[in-house]
Amino acid sequence: MTPNRTVIAVAAGAAVVAAAVALPLFQPWRVFTDTVVDEALPGGPPATVSTAGPATPVTASPSVMPSSSPAPPTISGDRPSTPAQAPVTLGQGRLISHEHDTSGTVAILRLPNGSRTLRIEGLDTSDGPDLKVWLSDAPVREGKAGWHVFDDGKYHNLGKLKGNKGSQNYPIPADVDLSTFSSVTIWCDRFNVSFGAAELKT
């Protein structure tokens, strides 16, 4: 084998090895895929889940944001019905874009049974590897200055992001002190970067 062919063979082998390592790590095809998860509030109908490629439209079932006050009672004949208890909103915010275009709203809800959940409504972000939903004490900053701050201080991982589109619930453990957290981030744990985040306001 001539020297030139040897160099080409070595380079080709190195390229194959690099691709074998990089593809599972970066998963570039996920730029073109979507996972839609639409959940009702806890106690409602089950979630709908669909996965689509770039040319497949996905129609998500509608969801309704809870109000912060109970619905008024309705009257049936002479006997008033008992109003259904509604979740109470403890904090809420709107997602802004960081490393990827991201939109939607977040709300921390106290449910009638006393438990708490983080509700994400109308989420629209990129699919990606190792995405998590975090509560954080970091400030929400626009632009690149806000991409990497959420693991600098205190944070709590609420679990893997269920889908990059839709409306979803993430239970908050009873021992989590919400007064120590001021933001929510869609966090890529593999590359330590925020896809998008929201400041929580009471």
Image (cartoon, rainbow, N blue to C red):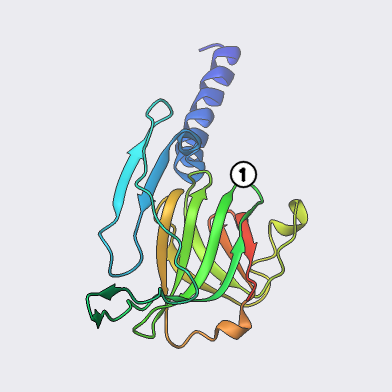
- Give the side of residue 183 with respect to residue 163, left or right: right
Q: Quadrant of residue 42?
A: bottom left
Vertical order, 102 against 141 (above or below): above
Q: Quadrant of residue 82?
A: bottom left
- Name the residue that disc number 1 marks: 101
- Give the side of residue 158 with respect to residue 140, left or right: left
Q: Residue at x 72, y 69 (%)?
A: 139
Vertical order, 10 against 186 (above or below): above
Q: Position of residue 91 (x, y in %)?
A: 57, 74
Q: Residue at x 65, y 75 (%)?
A: 137
Q: Position of residue 83 (x, y in %)?
A: 33, 78
Of 150 and 61, the residue lying toward us: 61
Of 1 and 155, the residue lying toward us: 155
Identify the element where label 1 is drawn: loop
Say whether residue 28 is visible. Answer: yes
Q: Position of residue 151 (x, y in %)?
A: 63, 68
* Mark 1 residue type: Asp
Q: Position of residue 104 (x, y in %)?
A: 55, 53
